[in-house]
Image (spheres, grey):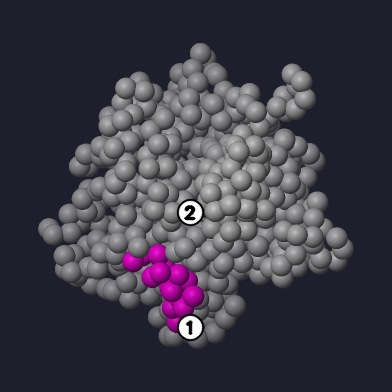
């Protein structure tokens, strides 16, 4: 982790009093071109600094989205700001819901793009062409990812163009709705700036002469586009991006048959828990596409440790809901024969456990002590990509393929070379690398749970329109449920739930599922509120009229 120690995080900005202040370009929150863009080494440091800011933003995204969802609840000692988010009643100046840190990264990306492009024009060739293009592409992708998360949380975004400089009338800045923002981000990713789009793989190791983990700190452009296409209801493009990514044919290094395919890695060969328990020097790059890394020896602390830990020295502001813990209870889909039950390795004590008499979310604390609070935060990892592919295939009506990806993966269908039996006989799957893929549940050696199970379909006649519609609904629910098991506490389930409900125009599904986190007597009021999709977003006043 010496790279962050060597390179100054020159983009760190001072805390800002309000969003309106933030949008004003002042010496406190702007990059100083005189200091940061007069030498190539400073430009390199500024580029790395952009990704260093994720150490602060990633935990915030996890906290906000998980409280908005149904898996995590505030504890009795949590501040009111946590309870406001949990209860969809955010008050002005709520520090948990404040979008300022996200907009700060947008502004830093804008400054980097503008000044680095200008530097490259003034001093052509000083930055190697390949490095220049990768830095621009990486910044385009980071900016797009941040804006996507602003949209997902707040339902709208102040769209601040990267080329803007000087004083700006805040009331005249365009405010894009979420539906307007998604196509804008897809366009920006595909066109970029200065004839460089966001589709290029950023090779940090070549750029800085490092080895190992560092290519995982930048945002995966294919993963981002897979998600963007899902939000845009372009399911064919989403499925293609996801498959292309896990086959390693596009933006990931070739040669590792286990990389991103959900093979026996992290199920049989290695324990699933090592995704969170390994040291920063050995993170799980075969699963992690984009990771926020911390190193306690360099005084880099993952704040989620304290938020979730019940140890006396910690805050312990959040804990699991019964919705989370029930995901792993003894249920029919874990039943083997007789009284035998399959053990899910994601269960207690990894995802959650009891510590000092309290229920705790344990992913960021597992086999860690107060002296090693540096578990990684995954921005994108392979299991999520598989679930997004399954979501896209479900929307396309390819239910058998979606079922397989959730359960046993590609391996049972491989014939030879690049050939697979149905449902993977289409050209999109014609990559031999997929032959080791065991699926989300299959790699963990737990029983399959398929949308065709009688407990879901009852006596509905197969091949009838009612059967087809019911199977789609079941698959959507299974994807949401598997997201709750696989990605609990990683800030994913609420967004998967919201996206599927939004894309299917089925707000009742989300309202029904998420309100289970409340006591029975309170559910009807919250369910009525969440029938309105506008209530799915945090209403935070950016004070743009000041």
Residue 403 place in picture, x, y as percent: 66, 49
Badge 1 crowding class, 10 Å Cα cut-off, few under 14, some 14 to 19, many 20 or more, is few
Q: Quadrant of residue 38?
A: bottom left
Report the side of 395 relative to 277 (left or right). Answer: left
Identify the element where label 1 is drawn. Answer: loop
Report if residue 438 is visible in the image.
yes
Q: Nearer the viewer, mark 2 or mark 1?
A: 1
Residue sitting farthest toward the right = 416
Q: Quadrant of the C terminus?
A: bottom left
Question: What's the magenta region?
Answer: 180-195
What residue lies at 54% left-to-right and 26% top-to-bottom? 326
Identify the element where label 2 is drawn. Answer: helix
What residue lies at 54% left-to-right and 18% top-to-bottom? 355
Q: Is residue 510 above or below residue 40?
A: above
Residue sitting farthest toward the left = 546
Q: Is residue 185 magenta?
A: yes
What residue lies at 53% left-to-right and 81% top-to-bottom? 126
Q: Quadrant of residue 511?
A: top left
Dots 2 and 1: beta carbons under 8 Å?
A: no
Q: Main secondary structure of the magenta part?
A: helix
What mark, if any, has residue 195 been given in the picture? 1
Residue 13 place in picture, x, y as percent: 34, 54
Residue 7 place in picture, x, y as percent: 52, 58
What mark, if any, has residue 52 been given in the picture? 2
In terms of depth relative to the viewer, which is nearer, 425 or 7?
A: 425
Q: Is residue 273 magenta?
A: no
* CA distance separating discs 2 and 1: 26 Å
Q: Which numbered disc flags the more N-terminal residue, 2 or 1?
A: 2
Residue 230 place in picture, x, y as percent: 49, 60
């Amino acid at each position: 982790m010496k790279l962050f120690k060597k390179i100054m995080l020159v983009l760190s900005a001072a805390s800002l009093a309000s969003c309106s202040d933030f949008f004003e370009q002042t010496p406190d929150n702007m990059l100083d071109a005189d200091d940061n863009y007069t030498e190539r080494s400073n430009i390199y440091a500024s580029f790395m600094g952009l990704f260093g800011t994720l150490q602060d933003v990633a935990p915030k995204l996890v906290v906000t989205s998980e409280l908005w969802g149904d898996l995590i609840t505030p504890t009795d000692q949590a501040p009111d700001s946590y309870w406001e988010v949990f209860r969809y009643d955010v008050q002005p100046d709520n520090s948990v819901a404040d979008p300022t840190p996200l907009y700060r990264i947008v502004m830093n990306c804008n400054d980097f793009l503008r000044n680095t492009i200008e530097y490259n024009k003034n001093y052509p060739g000083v930055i190697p062409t390949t490095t220049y293009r990768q830095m621009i592409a990486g910044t385009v992708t980071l900016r797009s990812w941040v804006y996507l998360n602003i949209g997902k949380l707040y339902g709208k975004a102040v769209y601040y163009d990267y080329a803007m400089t000087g004083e700006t009338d805040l009331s005249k800045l365009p405010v894009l709705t979420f539906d307007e923002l998604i196509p804008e981000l897809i366009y920006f990713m595909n066109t970029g700036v200065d004839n460089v789009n966001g589709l290029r793989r950023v090779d940090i190791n070549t750029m800085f002469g490092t080895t190992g983990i560092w290519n995982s700190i930048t945002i995966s452009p294919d993963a981002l586009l897979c998600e963007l296409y899902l939000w845009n209801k372009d399911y064919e493009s989403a499925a293609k991006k996801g498959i292309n990514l896990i086959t390693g044919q596009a933006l990931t290094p070739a040669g590792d048959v286990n990389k991103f395919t959900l093979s026996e890695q992290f199920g049989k060969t290695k324990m699933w828990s090592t995704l969170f328990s390994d040291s920063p020097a050995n993170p799980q790059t075969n699963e992690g596409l984009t990771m926020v890394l911390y190193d306690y020896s360099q005084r880099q602390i993952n704040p989620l440790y304290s938020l979730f830990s019940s140890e006396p020295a910690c805050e312990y502001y959040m804990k699991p809901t019964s919705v989370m813990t029930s995901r792993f209870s003894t249920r029919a889909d874990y039943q083997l024969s007789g009284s035998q039950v399959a053990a899910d390795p994601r269960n207690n004590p990894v995802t959650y456990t009891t510590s000092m008499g309290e229920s705790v979310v344990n992913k960021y604390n597992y086999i860690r002590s107060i002296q090693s609070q540096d578990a990684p935060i995954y921005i994108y990892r392979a299991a999520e990509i598989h679930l997004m592919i399954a979501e896209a295939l479900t929307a396309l009506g390819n239910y058998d393929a979606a079922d397989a990806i959730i359960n046993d993966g590609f391996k049972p269908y491989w014939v030879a070379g690049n050939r697979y039996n149905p449902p993977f006989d289409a050209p999109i799957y014609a990559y031999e690398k997929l032959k080791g893929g065991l699926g989300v549940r299959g790699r963990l050696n737990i029983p399959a749970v398929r949308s065709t199970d009688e407990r879901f379909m009852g006596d509905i006649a197969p091949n009838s329109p009612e059967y087809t519609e019911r199977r789609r609904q079941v698959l959507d629910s299974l994807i949401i449920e598997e997201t709750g098991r696989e990605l609990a506490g990683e800030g994913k389930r609420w967004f998967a739930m919201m996206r599927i409900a939004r894309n299917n125009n089925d707000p009742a599904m989300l309202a029904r599922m998420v309100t289970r986190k409340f006591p029975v007597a309170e559910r009807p009021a919250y369910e009525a509120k969440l029938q309105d999709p506008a209530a799915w977003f945090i209403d935070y006043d950016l004070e743009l009229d000041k």
